[in-house]
Amino acid sequence: MADFCRRSIVVVLMLLVISSTSRGQQINEAMQLYFKDVRVGKYPAVPKILVISENAKVILPALASYLTDSLAEVRSKAYTITSLSGNSARQSHLRELAVAYLVSGTRDVDGGNAGISLDYLASFLKEDFNSTSKDSVRSLFRKKAQHFEKVIKLCGFLELVDLKEEIRPYTQAGNSQSLRWAALVSLARMGDGAAISEVDRRARKLPVNDDVIYSIFPDLAYTRNRQLIGYMVEILQRDDATCMSADAERSVQIPCGYRVMEQLAPVVKGYPLSLDASGDVKTNDYVAALKTVREWFAKHQNYEIIKDKY
């Protein structure tokens, strides 16, 4: 009986090894075929096998050579798969590896690749950045790397408070308006009182319309500051029809709260609505959805703000 059990265990282990080897071969073949198409100017959809969470331990190490390829297009798609696979991974060391790859990507000689690497980094959790990655982000800031405004906001997200006094000069006159704003919201994310007050002052003096809702309010949400999120909730409660509906054929004025309720969904814990893949609220009745959110805030005035996401 004991011999039978031992033989059974050996067989099971052998089958697991064979299965793992076969899956690894399938992943490598899928990756080779995908990048072969990319090299000749084709851009097929990323194969599903390259984004399944269970495959991340094979996918991410296999991407190393593509991330340093001589063709910018190959590197670009490698960054995309890094982001998709890294975000699907459950193991912390794999998510950290994906972040490390993308941090290296921010130094890509192709400006577009550097930019998308920064964008992809914003999709990870704060805990996915280990001390080495954080040090690399500090270096990007001090070297005033490409897409500097995005770098500054990444510093704010990671709460690299040791950089506060180095970021502060960028809030002053003599810098572009966009850089000054990026520095302010970065400092606000770090809890800097002066920056929070200045962002609040600037936001409140602007007319509430589509332009402001789309260009300024995402940065208020980014700060994760209760005072600034509170202003968004104020606008959510207003009935003033100062925004326009998204219907191109029959555009009508609507309360800006419809836009704000989407922006608050990823920011507030326990929020009564969720978003679909395109970032729209999952509902068939926007009027009822807005009413639900307004009532929820009335009952949850001590709502918790989610801070581990960008």
Image (tube, rainbow, N blue to C red):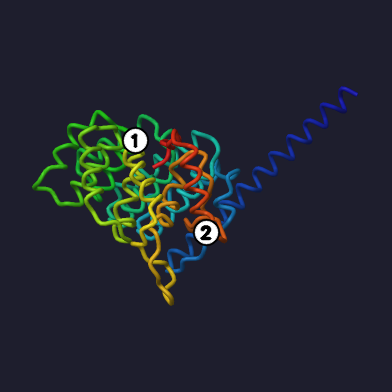
Q: How many marks?
A: 2
Q: Is residue 286 above or below residue 150?
A: below
Identify which amino acid the numbered label 1 is placed on: Leu
| Upstream in sequence: badge 1 or badge 2 | 2
Q: Nearer the viewer, residue 244 or 154?
A: 244
Query: Along the horizontal axis of the image, is 128 left or right of 273?
Result: left
* Residue shown at 18% from the left, 46% from the top: 180
Q: Nearer the viewer, residue 277 or 254?
A: 254
Query: Along the horizontal axis of the image, is 30 left or right of 102?
Result: right
Badge 2 crowding class, 10 Å Cα cut-off, few under 14, some 14 to 19, many 20 or more, is some
Query: Along the horizontal axis of the image, is 50 left or right of 109?
Result: right
Residue farthest along the top direction in this orientation: 2
Q: Position of residue 130 (x, y in %)?
A: 39, 31
Identify which amino acid the numbered label 2 is placed on: Val
* Residue shown at 43% from the left, 49% from the top: 65
Residue 301 location, quadrant: top left
Residue 242 location, quadrant: bottom left
Numbered badge on residue 158: 1
Mark 2 highlights which residue? 46
Residue farthest along the left direction in this orientation: 174
Could one spot residue 148 in this view of the protein?
no
Q: Nearer the viewer, residue 187 or 247?
A: 247
